[in-house]
Amino acid sequence: MRTTPLLVSAAAVTALLTLTACGGGANPTVGGIGSGTGSGTDGATDGGPDEGTLENPTKNGGVDGNAPKDGTAFQKLPKAGTIAAAARFVNGFTKCAEITTTQAGYKYWDQDVARYGENYSVVERGSCDQGDTRIFMIKDMKRFQTAYKEDIAKKAAENKGSSTAGVVIGQDFTVGSTHSTAMAALLEPRAGLLTLNCHPEFKPPSGFRKEPALVDGCVLTDYRKS
């Protein structure tokens, strides 16, 4: 794979070292993507217009396998660090050229704010191209998975929802869309994302993955059907 040399200033190097050490820093708008101040790493500095692509993996885990090869399925998931990087990554598989992080132009703002409360550990949310694909930056993914499992258990008790449905996740972000084609694109092997499924009756067809998530009773799979 061809790589492009990246020239950075001393200040940028300092910011990168700070991010690696403690996960902190600023989160400016870069390349017209990302206007919020929060992220899955408490506002990490964005890595440039190509961050979150296969040519320029993200700083905090990588989108092309920078995680340990002998790590768990979760450890091998892409990790964005910022909502800008997550949007660029998602845009490589389904449309997300711009991301809106404020209520204006965010089609499902009220619905998402109501659903993903504090117990989900969502620190920033954005709507792709003012449309039906949304990205959620997560501070504590285990906490998110716990809340998601509780929601699924409640729906199962009420005979609501599908046992084959789930939310597509990375290490520090999740993606949801009302379009099944978008969700399918994000589960392509080259994307590296997996579906979090916490339904007690879930059993994927043969040939699909079913690996442990961070919470007992939940699994990571490349199978999803809404």
Image (cartoon, rainbow, N blue to C red):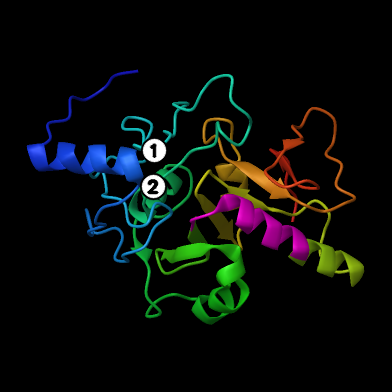
Left or right: 180 with respect to 163?
A: left
Q: Looking at the image, which is closer to me, 208 or 130?
A: 208
Residue 226 position within the rendered picture, expressed as x and y whole percent measured from the top left: 74, 56
Which residue has dot 2 on it? 81
Is residue 9 among the parts visible in the rendering?
A: no
Q: CA distance from mark 1 to mark 2?
A: 6 Å
Membership of 145 in magenta stretch: yes
Residue pictured at 84% horizontal, 54% vertical: 163
Membership of 149 in magenta stretch: yes
Which residue has dot 1 on it? 60
Residue pictured at 68% horizontal, 48% vertical: 196
The residue range painted magenta reads 138-150
**Residue at the front extreme, as displayed:** 22
Residue 154 position within the rendered picture, expressed as x and y whole percent measured from the top left: 83, 69
Q: Looking at the image, which is closer to me, 33 or 119?
A: 119
Magenta region, mostly helix, strand or loop? Answer: helix
Residue 207 position within the rendered picture, expressed as x and y whole percent measured from the top left: 79, 27
Left or right: 142 with respect to 38?
A: right
- Residue 111 lies, with reference to residue 143, above or below; the image says below
Q: Where the N terminus falls, by quadrant?
A: top left
Is residue 140 among the parts visible in the rendering?
A: yes
Mark 1 closeness class: few <14, some 14–19, many ≥20 residues within 10 Å: many
Sequence-first disc among 1 and 2:
1
Amino acid on which disc 2 is placed: Gly
Q: Looking at the image, which is closer to me, 18 or 183?
A: 18
Residue 210 position within the rendered picture, expressed as x and y whole percent measured from the top left: 77, 35
